[in-house]
Image (cartoon, rainbow, N blue to C red):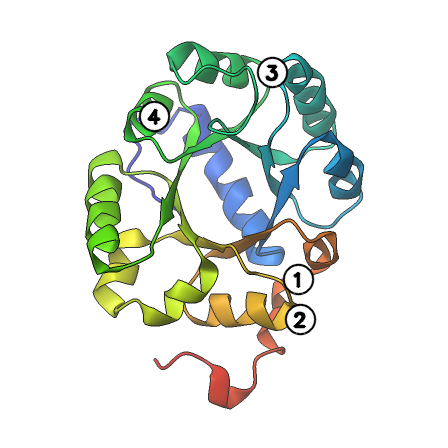
Amino acid sequence: MNSSRPAASSVVARTLPRLAAALHEVPVIASVVGTQRVRGFLDAPARVCILASVPVGQLGGVLATLRGADKTVFVNVDSCPGLAQDRGALEFLRDNGAQGAVSTRLSLVEKGHSLDLFTMMKVFVTDRSNLRRSLDAVARGKPDLVEVMPAPIAARLDPEAKRLLSPYVAAGFVETERDAAAALALGAAAVATSDPRLWQLRRDRLAAAVAPTEKASP
């Protein structure tokens, strides 16, 4: 996790060890799209989720449920109907128990820092020029995590690009246990997927899923 937080007494600083421990044990972030998948996440070993496409009128209740189950929740600010794209929206999420926010918008990542929220910047890497823009945005925003999409692009990134994006979460086209294991072997801190079958995967099991010839070079 990005540790460049100024105040050791902040909520983020105090919560960081728990988040790191959760992802160390189960390096799968559940992409919970809509309210229908909430129950499945509550019952899963995965402790961290990205909550998306939940109407603003239902967000408070869903966050209360997840908070009561001791889950760590990042809300995709860009995808929730009725949720504004401003500081007030982030304050609403924080006050209702969300620990983090996800956005493609640099301004929201910067505002999230000042509100003591974990921040995750989503970047879509489709070509080299897009990669340069993504690296610039990450350098300026200094998010705690970067969601890199699609996950298979990680195999095409050079070591310096990976370093600048790290710690990163590989997302998009993570469809099998082998996909998840390969992304971790390439340096991802975690993977994100909407497939509930993968919310059960623990790191020790994933480490065994990659054959020696497929593991990333040191």
Q: Amino acid at mark 3?
A: Val
**Residue of label 2:** 205
Q: CA distance from mark 2 to mark 3?
A: 37 Å
Which label was assigned to residue 202?
1
Judge by depth and name the residue closer to the eye, 18 or 153.
153
Residue depicted at 52% across the width and 29% down the height: 79
Residue at 41% in and 18% down: 85
Q: Residues within 10 Å of mark 3 (few under 14, many from 20)?
A: some
> In the displayed image of the protein, which residue is found farthest to the bottom?
213
The picture quadrant where one finds residue 140 is top left
Residues under numbered marks 1 and 2 in contact, where contact means CB atoms less than 8 Å apart: yes
The disc label shown at residue 113, or none: 4
Q: Secondary structure at mark 3?
A: helix
46 relative to 95 in the view: left or right: right
Which-is-in-front pick, marks 1 and 3?
3
Query: Looking at the picture, which amino acid does disc 4 mark?
Result: His
Marks 1 and 3, Cα distance to the nearest angstrom?
Answer: 32 Å
- At mark 2, the secondary structure is helix
Query: Circle 3 is placed at which residue position?
Result: 56
Lower position in the chain sequence, tag 4 or tag 1: 4
